[in-house]
Amino acid sequence: MFKIRVYVGYKESVLDPQAEVIQGAINRLGHGEVSDVKIGKFFDFKVSATSKEDAIQIAEKISDQLLANVNMESFKVEILEEL
């Protein structure tokens, strides 16, 4: 069994107005050194698989089919721990 984390965020080519608003607020707080703010989300779940490669493959399939809108978002799968 593996504990998985999937990070989902907008692709570089997609405009993220929420991130722009947050960056503007950060800059107004006096942190002009901050730029290129990105908003994302993550999902944690456990996968019963015989190998790390199988667990990643299962998580990628779930991410592609359900967790990310592949037209606008990209995802990254990470194994947090082997249980």
Image (cartoon, helix red, strand yellow):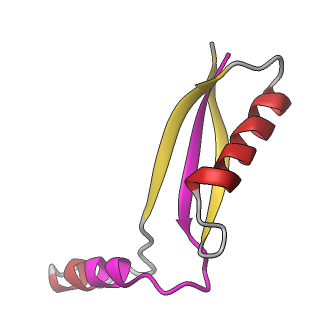
Residue for point 24% across, 84% down: 27
Residue for point 59% across, 66% down: 69
Percent position of residue 79, x then y: 66, 33
Question: Horizontal placement of 7 versus 77: left or right?
Answer: left
Kindly indicate the quadrant of the structure image that contains residue 10: bottom right
Residue placed most toward the observer, 50 or 36: 50
- Farthest left residue? 29
Residue for point 67% across, 44% down: 62
Residue placed most toward the observer, 19 or 26: 19
Question: Horizontal placement of 40 versus 48: left or right?
Answer: left
Residue 14 sits inside the magenta stretch: yes
Kindly indicate the quadrant of the structure image that contains residue 38: bottom left
- Magenta residues span 1-23
Residue for point 73% across, 46% down: 60
Task: Give the answer, above or below, for where 83 lies relative to 58.
Answer: above
Q: What is the count of numbered marks?
A: 0
Percent position of residue 21, x then y: 27, 83
- Which quadrant would the C terminus be assigned to in this image? top right
Question: Horizontal placement of 57 versus 17: left or right?
Answer: right
Task: Give the answer, above or below, for where 21 lies relative to 38.
Answer: below
Task: Give the answer, above or below, for where 73 lies relative to 14.
Answer: above
Residue 7 sits inside the magenta stretch: yes
- Which quadrant would the N terminus be assigned to in this image? top right
- Farthest front residue? 65
Question: Horizontal placement of 29 versus 73: left or right?
Answer: left
